[in-house]
Amino acid sequence: MDIVEVVRFQRFVEEGNEALLDRLFTPAEREYCRPRRASAQHYAARFAAKEAFVKALGMGIREGIGWQDVEVTHDPLDKPLLRFTPNAQERLRERNITRSHLSLSHDGGMAVAMVILESP
């Protein structure tokens, strides 16, 4: 689980800090967040999801997983999902993890994400 203050990402959006957003988020994540009225809360939730994922995996960013290795996407009913690059998939295989679950929420200036990883 991870929680993030939305104001951190509001500052990045207002300052037009595209270099940072490009480093933290995949092109698809930026395409999802950028046009939304409250884009900062969507960025914050995705950042929290990536942090929650590496915590659940038992490693940190830069310990074999990068920001671009994990992507928040949605199913046809808008349920949030995690998509992984081959690098992240290899880390999951090494730990015998077969499924992931993601929940996102934002309220009161905070964004939170919970990730559950399953193994047989």
Image (cartoon, helix red, strand yellow):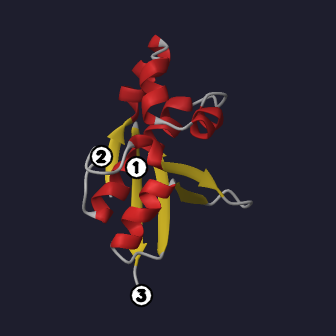
Left or right, 18 with respect to 108, comes to right
Nearest the viewer among 79 and 51 is 51
- Is disc 2 in contact with disc 1, using a CB cutoff of under 8 Å? yes
Q: Foreground residue, 79 or 19?
A: 19
Q: Amino acid at mark 2?
A: Ile
Residue 120: which disc? 3
Residue 92 location, x and y as percent? Answer: 40, 67
Measured Cα–Cα span from mark 2 to mark 1: 9 Å
Distance in Å between CA atoms under marks 3 and 1:
23 Å
Vertical order, 120 against 26 (above or below): below
Q: Nearer the viewer, residue 12 or 93?
A: 93
Tag shown at residue 50: 1
Residue 61: image tag: 2
Q: Please tell me which residue is depicted at 33% across the width and 73% down the height of the picture.
A: 95
Q: Find the residue positioned furthest to the right.
A: 76
Image quadrant for the C terminus? bottom left
Distance between mark 3 and mark 2 Cα atoms = 25 Å
Work out whether 102 lies above or below 69.
below
Tag 3 near tag 1, CB within 8 Å:
no
Q: Select label 3 or label 1 by which is in front.
A: 3
Expressed as whole percent of the image width and height from the top left, the position of residue 20 reads 41, 24
Q: Secondary structure at mark 2?
A: loop
Kindly identify the amino acid type of the residue bearing the numbered disc 1.
Lys
Q: Position of residue 112 (x, y in %)?
A: 39, 50
Q: Label 3 amino acid?
A: Pro
**Neighbourhood count class around disc 1 (C-alpha, 10 Å): few under 14, some 14–19, many 20 upward:** many
Return the disc, 3 or 1, that comes first in the chain's sequence.
1
Crowding at dot 3, Cα within 10 Å, few <14 / some 14-19 / many 20+, comes out as few
Q: Residue at x 47, y 76 (%)?
A: 98
